[in-house]
């Protein structure tokens, strides 16, 4: 297993993945529950890791029937951008709307939300979200926001220590949507491994 980027060697072929999928999925979902944080009624952040990204690539290859190295490398090129480096966290922000009325109401109002997410630390500082560059460049509409955003949270060394000491709150400070929730200790502990570059990936195969 690579420690910075996933490669073709980290992805099982279709038959091998089917043999281990149920158990791997069960373990990934257990870890993902710790990394999933709802902020208010309609937004959720999932903090990404090697496990969540690897699972996404394996599942995309399975569903889309991608069997070639070239095809899988294309998926890796997309999803590797979600992996956090030591000293930062990476998250996917979901705006969870289920009706056309809610979509029409909220998506125009939440333009810019990807720049208003912060982690509030016990030392009084805050780590603000930065949109993932390639994803941000692909946004072409100024009057409506997508329902999914990819974010990074770059930390200073002192902020890593403050995060580890807790407590930590996750907040959205958008003019149209202001909510805040304190991270559970188990969630904070899971994310400390990302910040310190020591998260151990699950075995696969």
Image (tube, rainbow, N blue to C red):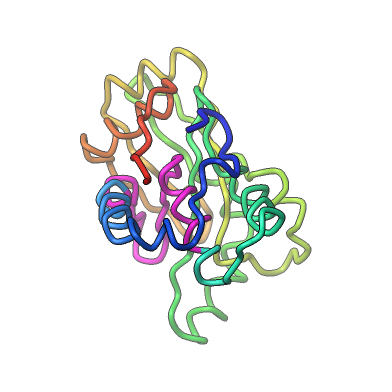
- Left or right: residue 86 compared with residue 180: right
Q: Which quadrant would residue 203 be assigned to in this image?
A: top left
Residue lying farthest to the top in this orientation? 158
Q: Which quadrant would residue 9 be assigned to in this image?
A: top right
- Left or right: residue 149 compared with residue 51: right
Residue lying farthest to the left in this orientation? 185
Q: 146 or 11: nearer the eye?
A: 11
Residue lying farthest to the bottom in this orientation? 100
- In the rendered image, residue 24, in percent from the top left (x then y), is placed at 32, 52
Q: Which quadrant would residue 131 be assigned to in this image?
A: top right
Q: Which residues are magenta?
A: 32-59
- Left or right: residue 75 compared with residue 189: right
- In the rendered image, residue 39, in percent from the top left (x then y), is placed at 36, 54
Residue at the spot 48% in from the left edge and 48% down from the top edge: 54
- In the rendered image, residue 76, in percent from the top left (x then y), is placed at 62, 49
- Left or right: residue 46 compared with residue 129: left
Residue at the spot 71% in from the left edge and 55% down from the top edge: 70
Whether residue 103 is situated above or below residue 35 in the rendered picture:
below
Q: 100 or 134: nearer the eye?
A: 134
- In the rendered image, residue 87, in percent from the top left (x then y), is placed at 50, 23
Residue at the spot 29% in from the left edge and 46% down from the top edge: 31
Residue at the spot 36% in from the left edge and 27% down from the top edge: 193
Q: Is residue 148 magenta?
A: no
Q: 64 or 156: nearer the eye?
A: 64
Whether residue 5 is situated above or below residue 97 in the rendered picture:
above
Q: 23 or 153: nearer the eye?
A: 23
């Amino acid at each position: 297993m690579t420690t910075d980027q996933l490669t073709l060697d980290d992805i099982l072929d279709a038959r091998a993945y089917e043999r281990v999928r149920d158990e791997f999925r069960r373990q990934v979902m257990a870890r993902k529950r710790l990394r999933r944080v709802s902020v208010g009624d309609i937004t959720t952040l999932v903090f990404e890791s090697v496990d969540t990204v690897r699972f996404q690539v394996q599942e995309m290859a399975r569903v889309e029937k991608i069997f070639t190295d070239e095809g899988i490398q294309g998926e890796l090129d997309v999803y590797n951008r979600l992996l956090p480096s030591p000293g930062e966290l990476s998250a996917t922000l979901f705006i969870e709307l289920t009706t056309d009325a809610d979509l029409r109401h909220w998506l125009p109002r939440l333009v810019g939300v990807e720049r208003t997410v912060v982690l509030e630390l016990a030392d009084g500082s805050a780590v603000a979200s930065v949109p993932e560059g390639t994803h941000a460049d692909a946004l072409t509409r100024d009057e409506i926001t997508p329902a999914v955003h990819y974010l990074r949270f770059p930390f200073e060394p002192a902020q890593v220590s403050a995060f580890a000491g807790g407590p930590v709150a996750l907040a959205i400070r958008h003019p149209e949507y202001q909510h805040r929730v304190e991270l559970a200790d188990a969630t904070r502990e899971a994310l400390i491994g990302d910040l310190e570059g020591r998260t151990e990936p699950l075995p696969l195969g």
